[in-house]
Image (tube, rainbow, N blue to C red):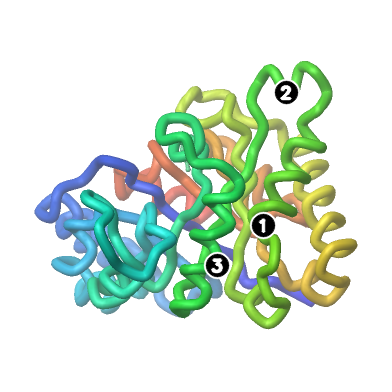
Amino acid sequence: MSRKQILAGNWKMNQTITEARNWIRIYQAGQKKGFRTDVLLFPSFTTLYPVSKEAMKAGITLGAQNIHEAEHGAFTGEISAKMLIEAGAKWVLVGHSERRTLFGETDDRINLKVRRALFSELRVILCVGETLEERNAGTHQEVVRQQVINGLQDVHKSDLAHVVIAYEPVWAIGTGKTATPEDAQEMHAAIRQIINSEKGGEIAEQMRILYGGSVNKENAAALFACPDIDGGLVGGASLKVESFLSIFRAL
Ligand code: PGA
């Protein structure tokens, strides 16, 4: 079966409301209609609601970069699924390596976030990926396998249609170093195999698996041509609308 490709922009702690509005205006003018790709943007929490109408008109679906696992309560500085949905988010990123390393998110916590999001009818991009040390030690496949299994533990099969996995090797994020298409394809095929054995062949076949880590307009086409790479999660190169559009054309 053919999987619909996704191009997602992770803006991290960048783009004010004004900058985001400009970005979307230029994107809309430069975009061709009738494409068969889901375009997702993950702006800051404060930018979500103010740009939600413009984004919809431009054919962009919005998502949030984080979520708290509790429904509500005394969690100063955190954000709930209900708040995100009301602000216009349809998706949420969970398990990004910056959340894992800078904010100490464990697989258990990530799993709770995944389940909270799905229970609340948000779609999830679950991010996984090994460090350079793990790759050099040859444990990268096992590390990613554990992240996928733990992140999706107790997720009901019917909810897995709302989950996308992003393979983002930590050593490639924001570094300008990209996995070769061969290495990326190898890991994507391995992830699909894990989903196959854990959740069944049909789900594995339908699961969209994105590559992330220094994707740019030069390397995008070769990565996206790989059979198990269903699109990209783009950080730095999504901040400039022209470079995002060039990556889009590579799809
Ligand atoms: P990058 O970030 O494209 O800047 O490497 C990707 C990401 O963190 O999702």
Of callouts 1 and 3, the N-terminal one: 3
Q: Crowding near pointer 2: few (<14 within 10 Å), some, many (20+)? A: some
Q: Quadrant of residue 52?
A: bottom left
Task: Kindly tell me whether mark 1's CB lies below 8 Å from ligand 1.
Answer: no
Q: Residue at x 49, y 30 (%)?
A: 101
Residue type at the position of mark 3: Arg
**Relative to 75, does residue 218 appear above or below in the rendering?**
above
Q: Is residue 226 left or right of residue 217?
A: right
Q: Quadrant of the C terminus?
A: bottom right
Q: Residue at x 78, y 45 (%)?
A: 145
User: What percent of the width, then of the height, locates residue 5?
Assistant: 60, 65
Q: In the rendered image, is residue 60 in sight?
A: no
Residue underneath mark 1:
209
Between 201 and 60, the residue placed more toward the observer is 201
Gap between marks 1 and 2 measured at Cα: 21 Å
Residue positioned most to the bottom: 158
Residue underneath mark 3:
115
Secondary structure of the residue carrying tag 1 is strand
Residue underneath mark 2:
134
Gap between marks 1 and 3 measured at Cα: 19 Å
Residue type at the position of mark 2: Glu
Secondary structure of the residue carrying tag 2 is helix
Q: In the rendered image, is residue 84 in sight?
A: yes
Q: Is residue 160 left or right of residue 190?
A: left
Gap between marks 3 and 2 measured at Cα: 27 Å
Q: Quadrant of residue 169?
A: top right
**Relative to 42, does residue 52 appear above or below in the rendering?**
below
Between 129 and 20, the residue placed more toward the observer is 129
Q: Residue at x 52, y 73 (%)?
A: 118
Q: How many marks?
A: 3
Contact between labelled residues 2 and 3, with CB atoms less than 8 Å apart: no
